[in-house]
Image: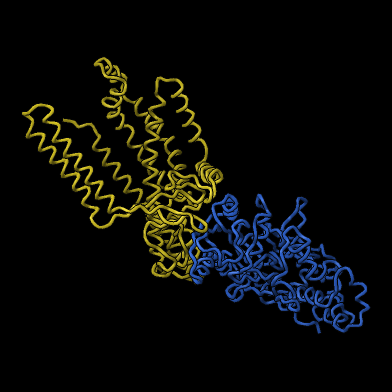
Chain colours: A blue, B yellow
Amino acid sequence: MQRSLLLSLAGGLLAAGIAAPATAAGGDTLAAVKARGYVKCGVSEGLPGFSSPDEQGNWSGIDVDVCHALAAAIFDDPNAVRFSPLNAKERFTSLQSGEVDLLSRNTTITIQRDVALGLEFTGVTYYDGQGFMVRKAAGVTSAMGLDGAAICTQSGTTTELNVADYFRANGLTYTIVAYEKEAQAVSAYDDGRCDAYTTDQSGLYAQRNKLRNFDEHIILPELISKEPLGPAVRQGDDNWEDIVRWTLYAMVNAEELGVSSQNVAEMRRSESPEIRRLLGEEGSFGEAMGLSNAWALQILRHVGNYGEIFDRNLGEGSPLKIERGKNALWTKGGLQYAPPIR
Amino acid sequence: MIVASVVVLLVATAQENIAKQRIATGFGFFDDEANFAIIQTLIPYSETSSYARALLVGLLNTLLVAALGIALASVIGFTVGIARLSPNWLVARLAAIYVETLRNVPLLLQLFFWYFAVLRALPRPAASLSIGDAVFLNNRGLFVPALSFDGMAWLAPIVLVMMVLASRVVSTRTRAGTRWLDRWPRAGLIAFGVVSAAGILAFTVRAEVPALTGFSFQGGVRVIPELMALVIGLSTYTAAFIAEIVRAGIQGVAKGQHEAAQSLGLSRWQTLRLVVMPQALRIIVPPLTSQYLNLTKNSSLGTAIAYPDLVHVFAGTALNQTGQAVEILTVTMVIYLTLSLLTAAAMNWYNSRLRLQER
């Protein structure tokens, strides 16, 4: 979200540090991970649904499950992961310097991050976008109904800019109340200072749970910006990039093929060649990546398919109750589409 | 010499690093469109205005808070300071409690208290508190009618002033006459002035009363809660320090001055106003200047409660959008420095006027 400043900071740190960790960056990450016995995974400092720790310090969330899936693919043990909570400023430097093997931290994929920071994004775990939350009592059902509204947000992020662009483009008037901290903006909205609160839509769902009267607020359907969130790895280790990329693809393909953690054992006996290739009964794609051919089977057995991790962390099975929406499979009108395993 | 060379070294290193990071440099961005909105603008401003304009908007908002805060802090501070020395036990105690509470709680916390507590207590726009359906108070701010003058409104004060002057002339001319004859023409002229001025105003002044439309009130003048909370927070906090300065100033005046004034038959108030205060001000003004400077600089804390001051608008949003931290922070610091130096210069001039005139 706080792209421009962070990028310049991160860019600066990278420019200074890029020469030193070149060996770690260019090296064989898979071999290093195998020798170490666990994956080092960079996550957020606590965003419900994506990555947040409980009282015992156990991490959960869809970003966390990507890390578990990767560990399951490599070690057949989803818990062979160590999590590093990273703030927005640290995240890219941590990945670049080799402190973490992958960054799975609600990070928006942008061209600048891709081409200027030495990163590779390996897919989209969640299609997000900036949205609005309003009180049900206001009777607003669309962002177009926000003419004249006061809108609370966090200052110094691109959300301010996105709001200005959206309202200008649609000829609507508004007043923006920009707070230094997210928590203050939410609190002010809750106190009635504003008619609407805006941030990334997934964040709206997470923040809504913290409001005094959760049920009195709705999240408007419009997204006014594109924020595709996904895991990132260092540039220069193509095999590692492939492993992380196909870990996510395997979970999306599994959902499409109807393979879940519940039925994966029976599905091994399936006649479908697509399912047989996914589960390693045919072909040797796992070995080509330096894993066992049962890599996807291990992911599904321990972690589940994309639909399962979505439901458990963000959807109906979670306190956030986010609808699949754009994150539904392409076969169901959504955007989640994985290249085939063959 | 050493300091100068360190500064030169730092500037050179910064320039080199910025070039290496390919961060844009220079002040060219000042003319670019700012692309963001500001909640309170004292001059016309829109998203298409330039960053330079945004800077000016932020600066004026800072000046507004500083001016209101200094005025209010002085009034409260002098009142509380004098009250602390009151012979009335209760008044003196209350003033002492005020000072000790306000100056011992961090200002940022006080601002949060004023802002969030005030917000929470105020009703929603639809249930606004109102005075005569013209002034409204709700959690979006204070809405008062805006007065617009048109046409010949400027005639009103002129008529009034002319009648008052005429009455003076009449009264001098008729000084020789009896008291009653003296008063009538005078009162008549002033009454005529007042009535005709009111008549002119009634036809030329229009009050735009705020009205609830859609989400909030439209029209009229809006005082945002961020401004109210910031002015109240800054002035009550600074007033606690000013009160102590005033108390010290009054106590610094030799006791013999009190006693002499009282033996002359002056009342307590007269003693304070005519004898003690003029001397106390010489002690009060220098530290008072520091408090005024503190208040102006502390106004940058308003950024925490979403008040669009210089730091919030320029060193916050504009900095994040342009990424030109060095230029923006330098400009911001220079502006605060200039404001402080100007305030100090004005106070020093005032102080020199108060100085004992040696003949």
From the top left corner, tell me how far across and down residue A5 is, in percent: 53, 64
Front residue of B292/B162: it is B162
Q: Quadrant of residue B195?
A: top left
Residue found 66% across the figure and 75% down from its top: A120
Front residue of A223/A290: it is A223
Residue found 14% across the figure and 31% down from its top: B183
Compared with residue A48, is residue B185 higher up or lower down, i.e. above or below? above
Can residue B17 be seen from the camera position used here? no
Can residue A177 be seen from the camera position used here? yes
From the top left corner, tell me how far across and down residue B131 is, in percent: 44, 43
Residue lying furthest top in this view? B263
How many discs appear? 0
- B267 sits to left or right of A99: left
From the top left corner, tell me how far across and down residue B233 is, in percent: 47, 42
Front residue of B337/B300: it is B300
Compared with residue A338, is residue B286 higher up or lower down, i.e. above or below? above
From the top left corner, tell me how far across and down residue B157 is, in percent: 22, 47
Compared with residue B33, is residue B359 higher up or lower down, i.e. above or below? above
- Identify the image quadrant of the N terminus of chain A: bottom right
Q: Quadrant of residue A289?
A: bottom right
- B111 sits to left or right of A138: left
- Identify the image quadrant of the C terminus of chain A: bottom right
Residue found 26% across the figure and 42% down from its top: B349
